[in-house]
Amino acid sequence: MEILIVFTLKLIDNTLNTMKNIFLIKEKFLVSSLFAALSTAVYMFMVMKMAKTDGLISIVAIFVATFIGTLLPGTVVKKTEKDRLFIYDITADNFNNGKKFADILREADIATKTSIAYNNEMDKTLSIQAYCSSRDESRLVNENISSTFKYNIYAPIKQE
């Protein structure tokens, strides 16, 4: 019974510690601090319980709990996060290829803005800004963009 308690406490400790790191990265310092404090408290209870158990079995239990407690929160948070807006700034190699690419994006209902641009040789080409609001839209742009195009991807903006 003690080993199950140690496992559960370590699972909770690692989950809280992982959540602390996630919120620290998101610059939510108060929430991160709360998770850190709770993690420390749970860790101390676990150490007290671990002293009463068989060493090898408790080490295996802590190993498994650490693995699950780190994997699970990150996976859950990633699945529940909203998609981000990616802005692609693309310059086609020539006008016709740019038009074909922009038509593919428009057919997929991806918001696009096109304008005439000129390359280094002063040949007329097309500049395209694509606004992708989901991972699927970003994937479609990446799959269809020609290797001869020049492009930048602006830092994602959180949609809230």
Image: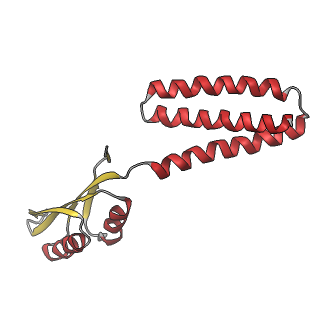
Task: Work out whether 105 lies above or below 44.
Answer: below
Task: Residue at 79%, 35% (x, y): give it.
Answer: 5
Task: Work out whether 66 lies above or below 28.
Answer: below
Image coordinates of residue 1 in percent, x first then y, are 86, 37
Image coordinates of residue 12 in percent, x first then y, are 67, 35
Image coordinates of residue 147 in percent, x first then y, are 31, 69
Horizontal relation, residue 74 to residue 125: left or right:
right
Query: In which quadrant will I find the C terminus?
Result: top left
Instruction: Work out whether residue 155 or residue 120 is closer to the camera in this orientation and state it.
Output: 155
Horizontal relation, residue 10 to residue 34: left or right:
right
Horizontal relation, residue 150 to residue 39: left or right:
left
Task: Work out whether 96 lies above or below 29.
Answer: below
Tell me the quarter of the picture where residue 70 sits: top right
Task: Residue at 19%, 74% (x, y): give it.
Answer: 103
Image coordinates of residue 11 in percent, x first then y, are 69, 38
Tell me the quarter of the picture where residue 106 sits: bottom left
Q: How is the image coloured?
A: secondary structure
As drawn, which residue projects farthest toward the right? 54
Horizontal relation, residue 89 to residue 22: left or right:
left
Task: Residue at 43%, 35% (x, y): give it.
Answer: 26
Count the numbered circles shown: 0
Task: Residue at 29%, 69% (x, y): give it.
Answer: 145
